[in-house]
Amino acid sequence: MRIEQGHRLAAFMIATEFGDLPALTKLPAALDRLGLLQVSTVLLFLLGGDEALRGEDGLPKTETPEMIESFFNMMAVAGRDAEFVRPEYLLADQVHLRSRVLGCGIVANCQNSLTSIGIGEGLLGALESLLATSLNLTTLPNLDHLEIRFVQSDDAPLTPVLSFIEEKGSTIAVVTHRPRLTYANRKEAAEFYDWLAQSVMRIFVTFAVPADSDAWGAAVLDDESGFSRAITFSNVPTMYGVIFGGKEKISIDDWSEDGDEPVALTRTAAWSPKLPDEKERPGPVKYGEGQAPEGMFDLERMRHTDYRVVSPIDAKKWDAAVWRGTFYMCSPGSRMIPILGLTFENAEPAAGIFEAWRERFGDSDPEDRLRLAIVTGVNISNPHAYAVVVGPNMDKIRSVSTDIVGFVARRNIMTPASSRNLDMFLSENRRIGRFMLAPAHMRSETEPPDPIGDFGWRNPIWLFVPHGPSGKTIPTAAL
């Protein structure tokens, strides 16, 4: 068992980041004391190459550099095939735990303490366990990413507190907790499980919502005893307390002893294994034709990591803002950059939408991740009607053939009496070569819209798509 553990740890630690190595020079000695010689050998190689492995009582000269390189290449392949992530040595003030649940990328930013990490692992583990059987039940995404921030405070109550804040236009879950969770009786300990159950549900409805709440509740919470399964083994802080006995050995220095000789870091650049290209590399999204292959959407066989949502749409904010229309501002023949404005009924959530976009995409979306499409010919009884669609630019999304990627977009149908304003905007955009996207507050249908904040946004991706046999369709998103 010990030998097998050593092999697995070695295959895991072969992917150590080069930037972490200066802090690990004394770790080989500690690993030797623990009987993990395979792991210390990996670190020696990463720190000093084959020369570090020779030394006194080291590898004989009959072991050539090529043979040594081949051995560690095989170890790197084993780690890749096992889908090991890069080691986290807890060297910074924060620890980032990542998971993907129902397509939403969740990042738990914990304090570098066993209590904070334990609560973060318990919360993510309970979410993953509860929703593991939900892929075959239709859920509607509210967000494609969510941050859970952990704050350690001496003044916090014994049971952690979950709250939600708005920061730079994005919703952030905040968990405030004590540096240590020490329970005086069984009732106090049970309160953690109650808090965990409630927090899992509150976080879930923040990033997704079931299409049929009754069916989802019956399948996940009742029929499969989802809550009891998810919560039973999720008090990770208490588990850590049992394992470590109240002594936190998080720092690498905690495992070192007086007299441990550091290993010199002689490499000037990271070692790069020569991995065979056996697995498909992520590439641009490819559009299929005809019927989907059999089993492609068999969600029972999928893992949460096989499914992700890509969307610039925060569904709750868009629902609250109420997108009412589109307006244009331009001065033909001048140097003025034409403006395309989205008008909203409620200014505050609309400002949050654009603030989040600026934080996520920058001032000009240099990576072209946002797509704005104008589609004409959408109403047979009104030849001037058109749709404005806001969604992700799928041409910039990379995935493999086994992935399922969900898209979310919003659309608004405009029904003007003539196409004069749209034609003028499109003409000026072609002449200038760019436009600005901005939000505005629509007080009433008879008053001109008021600008919302300072959210003029330069040069997002856009499409003009004519409708009909000679036109194109929009592979933007599900509208």
Image (spheres, rainbow, N blue to C red):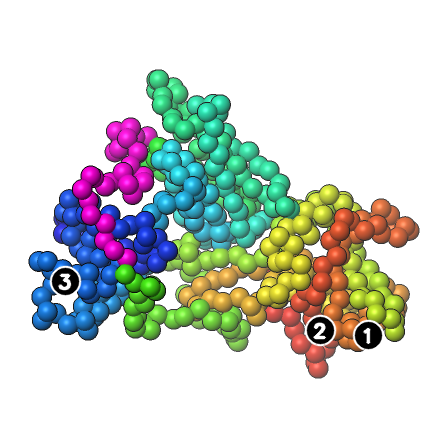
Left/right placement of residue 317 relative to residue 253 reads right
Residue carrying label 3: 54
User: Which sits in the foreground, 453 or 479?
Assistant: 453
Residue carrying label 2: 465
Circle nearer the viewer, 2 or 3: 3
Q: Residues within 10 Å of mark 1 (few under 14, many from 20)?
A: some
Q: Estimate the spatial distance between the alpha carbons at disc 1 and disc 2, rounded to whole Å.
A: 15 Å
Q: Can residue 87 be seen in the rendering of this structure? A: no
Residue 187, given in percent of the width and then of the height, sits at 38, 19
Dot 2 or dot 3: first in sequence order is: 3
Q: Quadrant of the C terminus?
A: bottom right
Residue 240, given in percent of the width and then of the height, sits at 30, 34
Residue range (magenta): 238-265
Q: Residues within 10 Å of mark 2 (few under 14, many from 20)?
A: some
Residue 112, given in percent of the width and then of the height, sits at 40, 39
Residue carrying label 1: 427
Three-letter amino acid code at disc 1?
A: Ser
- The verdict on residue 254 being magenta is yes
Q: What secondary structure is found at the residue carrying circle 3?
A: helix
Q: Residue at x 78, y 73 (%)?
A: 432
Three-letter amino acid code at disc 3?
A: Arg
Left/right placement of residue 208 relative to residue 190 reads right
Dot 3 or dot 1: first in sequence order is: 3
Q: Residue at x 37, y 45 (%)?
A: 91
Left/right placement of residue 204 relative to residue 326 reads left
Q: Is residue 289 above or below residue 10?
A: below
Q: Residue at x 38, y 71 (%)?
A: 280
Residue 453, given in percent of the width and then of the height, sits at 76, 48
Q: Estimate the spatial distance between the alpha carbons at disc 2 and disc 3, rounded to whole Å.
A: 66 Å
Left/right placement of residue 415 relative to residue 463 reads right
